[in-house]
Image (spheres, rainbow, N blue to C red):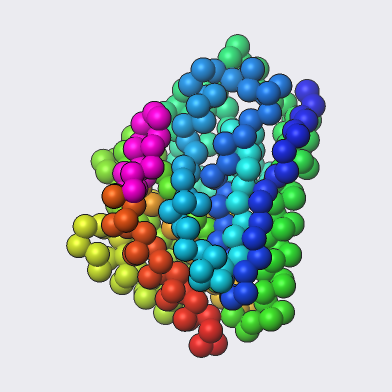
Amino acid sequence: MTFVTDQPPFRFRQGTRPLLISMPHVGTYVPPALAVRLTEEARHVPDTDWHLERLYDFADELGASVLIATHSRYVIDLNRAPDGASLYPGQSVTGLCPIDTFDDTPIYTAGDVPDDAEIAARRDAVWHPYHRQLQAELARMKAAHTTVVLWDAHSIRSRLPRFFEGKLPDLNLGTANGASCSEALASTLLGIAQSAPSYAGVLNGRFKGGYITREYGDAAAGVHAVQLEMTQSSYMQEALPFNYLPEAAAGVSPQVRQMLNAALEFAQKR
């Protein structure tokens, strides 16, 4: 099977300061020829990182560059290795071109899953362009600044028995167990995440950072990568129709902004 899309793989806004915000799972677009192969549940793309661009509406004011996926992770997961290698060996995970939802239900009807050729075509059309843009912007920023921060923005339902027990903490910071970011910055960010009385924050818990954090974070070279996996209950409705909840978002958004300000302050002092 081939893969054809009529949409660009990403949207990008270039900023002026040493901060790049990546949103690899906010995309909702599924080409029509692919959508007809999906189950009714999957056509709602429930595993989307909904409304993050709205939650991070202060990004331009901070002077950050912003890279935003357009295609659903059901087309291809931009935060997975291009060869499909598992980020968490031995644990339940979804793949490069997922065939099941977070609830462990099939994405495709009648087993009509993508073959190797289709996966390669999706990778060429969507995955590689996103990562080329990410790499190019990091290189541009690094040429202008001694130290830069890559912030990989994510959200997830607060309860997903397939992946973790009970309720997930609200603010889950990941630095690949310290490999992608300096200890000083990680400690500052965790302190902010844990300072808000209404939210729980952890560092390198269930979510330690995905492919983007692990691949591009290189603290020794001045590129500090951090993933924030936020519970969707902090700012939105976790079930259909997945509405944004402005009053809830107004509580957590300042914490996120404070973390990004701290990241910028860290970068600009180097």
Position of residue 187 in the picture relative to residue 101 (left or right)? left
Judge whether 201 appears above or below 5 on screen. Answer: below
Specify start and end residues of the magenta stretch as a single range.
Answer: 232-246
Identify the residue at image location x=51%, y=64%: 59
Residue 98 in picture, x, y percent from top left: 58, 32
Q: Residue at x 47, y 36 (%)?
A: 47
> Seen from this angle, which residue lies furthest top?
110
Q: Is residue 209 left or right of residue 196?
A: right
Q: In which quadrant of the rendered view does residue 20 lie?
A: bottom right
Q: Residue at x 27, y 43 (%)?
A: 167
Please indicate whether residue 235 sits to the left or right of residue 199 in the image.
right
| Residue 240 visible (yes or no) | yes
The quadrant the C terminus occupies is bottom right
Residue 144, percent across and down?
Answer: 69, 81
- Image position, residue 121 (x, y; %): 78, 35
The answer to which of 144 and 116 lies nearer the viewer is 144
Magenta span: chief secondary structure: loop
Across the whole image, how many numbered discs are drawn on residues?
A: 0
Can I make out residue 225 in this image?
A: no
Q: Work out whether 35 lies above or below 224.
A: above
Outermost residue, left direction?
Answer: 197
Residue at coordinates 51% horizontally, 71% vertically from top-left? 62
From the viewer's perspective, is residue 211 above or below residue 186? above
Q: Quadrant of the N terminus?
A: top right
Percent across and percent down for residue 158 are 32, 42
Residue 260, above or below 242: below
Q: Residue furthest bottom?
A: 269
Image check: 59 left or right of 33?
left
Residue 15 shown in magenta: no
